[in-house]
Image: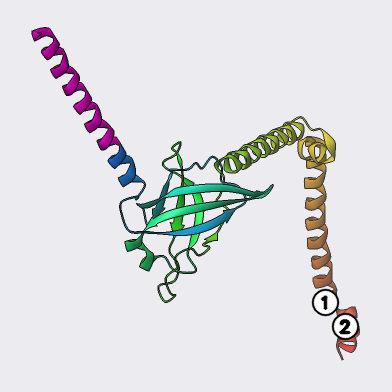
Amino acid sequence: MEKHIKYSVRLGIFVTLSLLLLISGIYFIGSRQKLFSNSFRVTGVFRDITGLQVGNNVRYSGINVGIVEKILQLTDSSVSVLMLIERSTQKFIKVDATATIGSDGLMGNKIVVVSPGKASRIAIADGAFILTAIPVSLDEILAKLKITGDNSAIISGNLAAITENLREGKGTIGMLLMDTLFAKDVAITVLNIKEGSGGFKQNMDAAGRSFLLKGQIRKAGK
């Protein structure tokens, strides 16, 4: 009899604790999903929700203000996302506000990020459609960075090859730059031109001083 009473007491305690845990869990989930608070609903149509799931957060100005209540595939290129948002936030979300799919941290769960609209616009209505935008994909950024890196490597390789060819005197430009005989010829030619110009000037000065040519020069000047 005493054993039976102890067993009944233990069973009663276990059942009571289980019920308390169940009620606490239901209340916690209900509170998180705003089931026990005053809420309103808006819908956004996205081309790609990139892993968004029912129950994920809706964030406005960095604050969690709601959850994703329902996801419905409309067509092969459009997905409807029904959001349940706290009523107290409705006055801040304007009709020109924009919803995008974001991440909770670098590698966290997907969330819906609502960007504020113009303060002068009216608040969005309950059951209305909210504007959506395509976010910048991390995969696209990484792909573009990879392409840029590959292109930079190709350009660097080409510049190195061109520099090496110039240093070895390959190609017309390389031959011109590295041919010392050609460089000497150019220097001699320039020197000859300078000397020729100087001689020509001296001859003209001498002719100007010549008694026989002074008259001809004066007539030409007139």
Q: Nearer the viewer, residue 183 or 56?
A: 56
Q: Residue at x 50, y 57 (%)?
A: 99
Give the labeled residue for mark 2.
217
Q: Nearer the viewer, residue 93 or 4?
A: 4
Q: Nearer the viewer, residue 152 or 198?
A: 152
Tell me which segment is drawn in magenta: 1-25
**Outermost residue to the bottom:** 222
Q: Is residue 81 left or right of residue 143?
A: left
Quadrant location, the C terminus: bottom right
Say which label, 2 or 1, has the lower sequence index.
1
Q: Amino acid at mark 1?
A: Gly
Residue 115 position, x and y percent, is 45, 60
Q: Is residue 24 left or right of residue 212?
A: left
**Outermost residue to the left:** 2
Give the labeled residue for mark 1.
208
Q: Is residue 98 magenta?
A: no
Q: Residue at x 42, y 76 (%)?
A: 120
Image: 8 above or below 167: above
Asked if marks 2 and 1 touch (Cβ < 8 Å), the reply is yes
Residue 100 position, x and y percent, is 51, 53
Residue 87 position, x and y percent, is 35, 61
Q: Is residue 142 left or right of residue 53?
A: right
Residue 7 position, x and y percent, is 16, 13
Image: 188 above or below 97: above
Say what secondary structure mark 1 lies in. helix
Q: Amino acid at mark 2?
A: Ile
CA neighbours of label 1 inside 10 A, class few (<14), some (14 to 19), many (20+): some
Q: How many marks?
A: 2
Q: Residue at x 49, y 41 (%)?
A: 53
